[in-house]
Image (tube, rainbow, N blue to C red):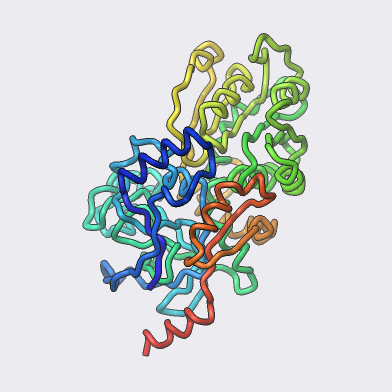
Amino acid sequence: MKAVQIDKNYTKFATAVVANKIKGHGNSLSSLPLSLVDLPELKLPDDSWTFIYPIMSGICGSDLKTIEAKSSRQLEHSVTFPFVMGHETVAIRADNLKMVVIESVLSCGSLGIEYCNFCQNSNIDLCQHQMYSDIAPGLQIGYTKDIPGGWSEFSMAQTDHLIEVPDDIQEEDAVMVEPMACAIHGVLKIDPTALKTFNSKPLVSVIGAGTLGLCVTAALKYLYKDKITVLTLAKHPYQQSLAKSLGADNLADLNNYLNKVRSLSGSLMTGPTLTYGSDIVIDCIGSKDSIHQAIFSTKPGGQIILVGMPSKTLLDLSLLWQRQITITGAYTYGTETASILKAKPKRTFDLAVDAVTKLKLGRLVSAKYSLENYKVAVEHAMNAGSRDSTKIVFKNNKEVLMKKLQRRVQ
């Protein structure tokens, strides 16, 4: 079975880092540590696992940061090379032929070990035993050498982490469930006290309009409807158009973002800093510049939420103290208990399936590539915004995979 694998080749990583500094985003793919490989036969850890056949898997921003050696070295102990990438995956279950999405977090339940305090309360995103099982360490499926991610023709998953999708849902919508779950998890980190404002409506700014930023924009309107004003910072006109269609009330680009926040919040400005600002800022980029923008544009006593995977950054955090701003991290998904849900705890993935179905988020899927064309696919994903694209995915032939599956069952 074919798969796209990343290897910890220090020579290639060093070359990629140098190329990034010289050329910026989208350097020569010949220097990047990816290859198309044949997977060995897999063995299920126990009876609670089943084989799966990926039919579509997205290229995430965190994947690109890993490929380009831009992610933090502090997370290296949380992955094991070489590994097959892909954590945004739609697949066919081998045991019942149902189409499923994979909740790719590795936690006590999926690892078959004694539940930690967090997993006992369904907070699998905070699992404290993640690195201590017979399965090689990995932040998620798609980051461990023992479980291939979705950039493959064949893998496996623990059955409790497979969520069946409605029969009428399109594959393009289904592949957006995982990124939408990350977005919803981030939005539900909003502290209600930070939404208390001097203005008629709380102002929530979203920095970034790639896949995650657009999903956060959509999630804000899905959860808060018209109770808030959403301002989305989008670099490209194509992204601005999508953000508007997903519910952004106002749009900004890199040149006018602070002025937009100043106008909408009724602020004055001292240098690059606003006297008031957005009640909440959700940063979906995680770079030095984006986090600084978030700090400069958040009101005193407001909240910054960092969603997704950060880059390596050096920051001046003085304003966090002076303005008493709260900064909150949000990673992956689990079980949600936020008061805005007004119901018993809900699995993030259940909320995400409902959201992508209602909002038809499959429209964010811009291009599909075979595994063999992985270099072209990754290059497209690296330059998606400038090419009027959003989500780039790998797609396997569903009919061919089903025939292989039927032969395997026989």
Tell me what residue is drawn at x 53 percent, y 77 percent: 398
Query: Percent position (x, y) of residue 179?
Result: 55, 51
Do we see residue 294 in this rendering?
Answer: yes
* Residue at the limit of the structure toward the top, as seen here: 270
Query: Percent position (x, y) of residue 338?
Result: 54, 41
- Viewer-side residue, 111 vs 155: 155
Tell me what residue is drawn at x 44 percent, y 72 percent: 53
Tell me what residue is drawn at x 45 percent, y 38 percent: 19
Please tell me how many numbered marks the rendered image carries: 0
- Viewer-side residue, 176 vs 73: 73
Do we see residue 342 in this rendering?
Answer: no
Q: Quadrant of the N terminus?
A: bottom left
Tell me what residue is drawn at x 59 percent, y 64 percent: 368
Does 393 sit left or right of 388 as displayed? left
Q: Quadrant of the C terminus?
A: bottom left
Q: Is residue 254 above or below residue 103?
A: above
Q: Is residue 182 above or below residue 164?
A: above
Picture quadrant where residue 197 is located: top right
Does 390 sit left or right of 138 as displayed? right
Q: Is residue 149 above or below residue 126?
A: below
Query: Percent position (x, y) of residue 259?
Result: 74, 21
Query: Percent position (x, y) of residue 342?
Result: 60, 46
